[in-house]
Image (cartoon, rainbow, N blue to C red):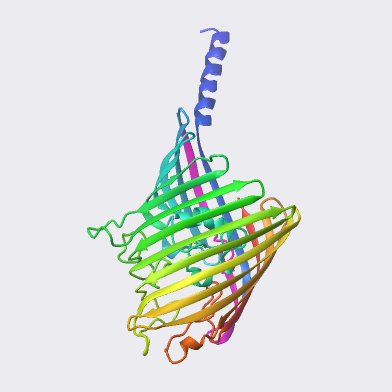
Amino acid sequence: MSMRRLVLVLSVMSAFTSVAHAQSSVTLYGLIDEGLDYTNNVRGHSLYAMSSGDGYGSRWGLKGTEDLGGGLSTIFQLENGFNVNRGTLGEEGQEFGRQAFVGLSSKAVGTLTLGRQYDSLVDYLAPLTINGSWGGAMFSHPYDNDNTDNTFRINNSVKYASVNYGGFTFGGAYAFSNSTSFADNRAQSVGAQYTGGPLTVAAAYLNVDNPNNGSAGAVANLGSSGTDGSWTAARQRIFGAGISYTIAAATLGFVYTNTNLSQPTATEYANLAPSPTLGAASSLKFNNFEVNAKYQFTPAFYVGGMYTYTRAIYDGASGGSAAAKYNQFGLMADYNLSKRTDVYLQGAYIKVASDPSLAGTGLEFAANVDAAGPSSSSKQFIARIALRHTF
């Protein structure tokens, strides 16, 4: 073989190799969030703590695509959460507890994925809340009762996400119970979002039957707390809607969510032992009203804030009801040191208003911001300064 012919063959082989590499890819990515927290009252004492992922969950992951031709691709994503302070796994010790799925994506009809995934509330509505977008966990609604801070994911799920139709997207998910009792610990969710110019509107719905019933279901029974972050109840049903509008450097938003828990038994969030006057809980409802704002002073610096009013209603099995009111305020300032590194300062305050209907019922609804622990009083304040790096 002549030298000229050998060079030609090698050039052709190199071209085919380049095409093959261009048709499939795998990306390593991640986020590290580390900071210092101060909480004024945790069970009667001040708490100073170094906290990993308390604003934005620390994570690393792999995601990839393979071009199958005709606008169709295979996709996958594996995402691990971890604690920077201790080097341990997050999400109750699961290897890929944040996300783990594989599926097919079509440029014409949308994406179908299977595995452990986010529900439609997280996908479509949560980005309009502070906690589900730029603010993080500190600004979640009390106990993250509506899962807009993705406290739990859904296992065994089949999820569809549409393509973008002129700014309109929609999707839904179904999560199997993986049990012979088909209705135990299964989940269904749907959602939609429209973005046109400065306006974004969204709505979503999630239903979980018997969450935390068994370790193989849609919301698994994991960890020392006995839950994967959701409530333990006969049913958890959530719906909500939101809107945001951008005017120059300012963005204003409003979100409403409604959470209805049938026969709840969880005790880690509030004292739900049977009330002496109302009996065991037949239902516990949360109505959350959030207003938020963000102002981008420069491309590298923004300030934002929120106010959330939440009303919790306890309905007793023996008749009657009692209510509690939450008023929550939050502020945040964020400065980018580079495209991948920023420092931020956050503060949040919550007060549980005494409702006359609680008198004599034996019920208690604790003030609790984020995950530091409940206050011994009706008030709690938390502040955080942190460094965040993405890769």
Q: How many marks?
A: 0
Q: Position of residue 365 (x, y in %)?
A: 48, 82
Closer to the camera in the image, 259 or 92: 259
Q: Is residue 255 left or right of residue 226?
A: right
Q: Residue furthest bottom?
A: 360
The residue sitting at 50% across, 61% down in the picture is 240
The residue sitting at 49% across, 59% down in the picture is 81
Q: Position of residue 63 (x, y in %)?
A: 49, 44
Quadrant of the rendered image containing residue 54: bottom right
- Note whether 382 is above or below 250 in the view shown: below
Residue 231 shows in the view: no
Q: Residue furthest front?
A: 320
The residue sitting at 40% across, 64% down in the picture is 237
Magenta span dominant secondary structure:
strand
The residue sitting at 39% across, 60% down in the picture is 207
Closer to the camera in the image, 239 or 43: 239
> Is 60 covered by the magenta stretch?
yes
Q: Residue furthest top?
A: 2
Q: Position of residue 305 (x, y in %)?
A: 67, 66
- Note whether 74 is above or below 70 in the view shown: below
* Range of magenta residues: 39-67
> Is 359 covered by the magenta stretch?
no
- Note whether 93 is above or below 269 in the view shown: above
Q: Position of residue 64 (x, y in %)?
A: 49, 41
